[in-house]
Amino acid sequence: MNIVSKSKKRVVLPSRPEPPTVEQILEDISKADPNDPVFSILEKTGHESPPPADSEVELRFQQCRRFLELTEQLEESRGRLQQQREELQATGERLDKEVEEVKNRIL
């Protein structure tokens, strides 16, 4: 029986950029138009849109509050994805060992 070994290439992903600072986020939000698509996405996703504001300050406050909520959700998702990634890596390593054991038994 002839077994051909295939090289397994691992994909190396680029490192993640640093998240923006609070100052950068606030600067970005302050420069955004109230009708910016980022803020209108809430309506498209079925999330409650901010209540009508009596002033520009209230509108910005509601936008910042929603942004922070979404940021929290993203952080939670990132944590879950990191855990799943680690579990998949551990499973992959176990699988690699088992495949190697099977190959050694055949030879």
Image: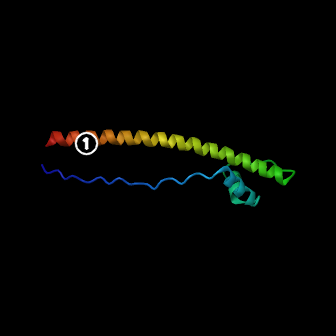
What residue did someone put label 1 on?
A: 99
**Which quarter of the figure has residue 9?**
bottom left
Looking at the image, which residue is at 77% across and 48% down?
62
- Residue closer to the observer: 30 or 56: 30
- Residue closer to the observer: 100 or 18: 18
* Residue 43 in the image, given as x and y percentages of width and height: 71, 52
Crowd rating for badge 1 (residues with CA inside 10 Å; few <14, some 14–19, many 20+): few
Q: Quadrant of the C terminus?
A: top left
Q: Which kind of residue does numbered mark 1 sit on?
A: Val
* Residue 81 in the image, given as x and y percentages of width and height: 50, 43
Looking at the image, which residue is at 22% across and 39% down?
101
* Residue 29 in the image, given as x and y percentages of width and height: 72, 56
Looking at the image, which residue is at 80% across and 47% down?
51
Q: In this view, does 28 lie above or below 87?
A: below
Looking at the image, which residue is at 82% across and 51% down?
57
**Which quarter of the figure has residue 100?**
top left
Task: Tell me if 74 is positioned left or right of 25 in this view.
Answer: left
Question: Tag 1, which secondary structure?
Answer: helix
